[in-house]
Amino acid sequence: GAVVSQHPSWVICKSGTSVKIECRSLDFQATTMFWYRQFPKQSLMLMATSNEGSKATYEQGVEKDKFLINHASLTLSTLTVTSAHPEDSSFYICSASTGVRSPLHFGNGTRLTVT
Amino acid sequence: AQKITQTQPGMFVQEKEAVTLDCTYDTSDQSYGLFWYKQPSSGEMIFLIYQGSYDEQNATEGRYSLNFQKARKSANLVISASQLGDSAMYFCAMRGDQAGTALIFGKGTTLSVSS
């Protein structure tokens, strides 16, 4: 149980275009989902906390107008990278939890390459 | 604020030997959880083991055990009988026990298991 599905697994886009990444909890409801970014050989850095039915909470230094997060239902959160640039190339991974003292369950991540 | 410190960028171990990955943490929360995740080169985040701050016994999950020393604020992961498939990046993480709290990760340790 507690499966998180993330699509697409990888995407290549041209500079200036937008890319949408979907994160779904398949067998549980997730009031809160989390979006992380990971550069090669580095740790996971929290970008934002996505709350169902309300605005996302962004970490310091993360541009909310560039990384649009929508959490329209208890099983779906989306991250849209707007006007992507090469420096946005990274591994984006979403996660959700089934409870307070439970681990975060992660999607398989999306590898974004902006050319 | 919470902080996780992993001081070993890389560790090397031979098959069938045990290895300890170090993790120290800092938090002002009274109730929190400590987690270890494994990230192979494919990028997926695999949950290994959880330790609650009020748990009196060290957590164990198969070949994984967590050496929890609350007074020292350490939560080291012990992998017994290492296998080639254990080669991966290992992350120590923590989160407070409040609803909607994200995981904060350490920088990770790359484990290499040789035959």
Image (spheres, coloured by chain):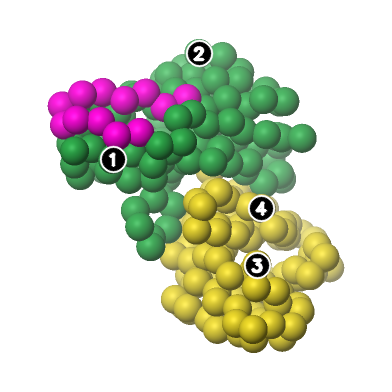
Q: Image point 42% across, 27% down: which residue? A: A21
Q: Earlier in the sequence, mark 3 or mark 4?
A: 4
Inspect this view and state whether residue A75 appears: yes
* Residue to which mark 1 is pinned: A113
Q: CA distance from mark 3 to mark 2?
A: 39 Å
- Label at residue A72: 2
Do tags 1 and 4 sit on the same chain? Answer: no
Q: Secondary structure at mark 2?
A: strand
Do tags 3 and 4 sit on the same chain? Answer: yes
Asked if the residue under mark 4 is in contact with the one under mark 2, i.e. CB atoms within 8 Å, the reply is: no
Q: Amino acid at mark 2?
A: Ala
* Residue to which mark 4 is pinned: B47
The quadrant where residue B25 appears: bottom right
Q: Which chain is green?
A: A
Mark whose residue sits in front, 3 or 4? 3
Q: Secondary structure at mark 1?
A: strand
Q: Residues within 10 Å of mark 1 (few under 14, many from 20)?
A: some
Q: Over which residues does the magenta segment extend?
A: A11-22
* Marked residue chain, label 1: A
Image coordinates of residue A110 in percent, x first then y, are 43, 38
Image coordinates of residue B88 in percent, x first then y, are 55, 66
Image coordinates of residue A36 in percent, x first then y, are 43, 43
* Marked residue chain, label 2: A
Asked if the residue under mark 3 is in contact with the one under mark 1, i.e. CB atoms within 8 Å, the reply is: no
Q: Earlier in the sequence, mark 2 or mark 1?
A: 2
Q: Is residue A45 above or below residue A4?
A: below
Q: Secondary structure at mark 4?
A: strand
* Residue to which mark 3 is pinned: B85
Locate residue B94 relative to residue A98 in the image: left or right.
left
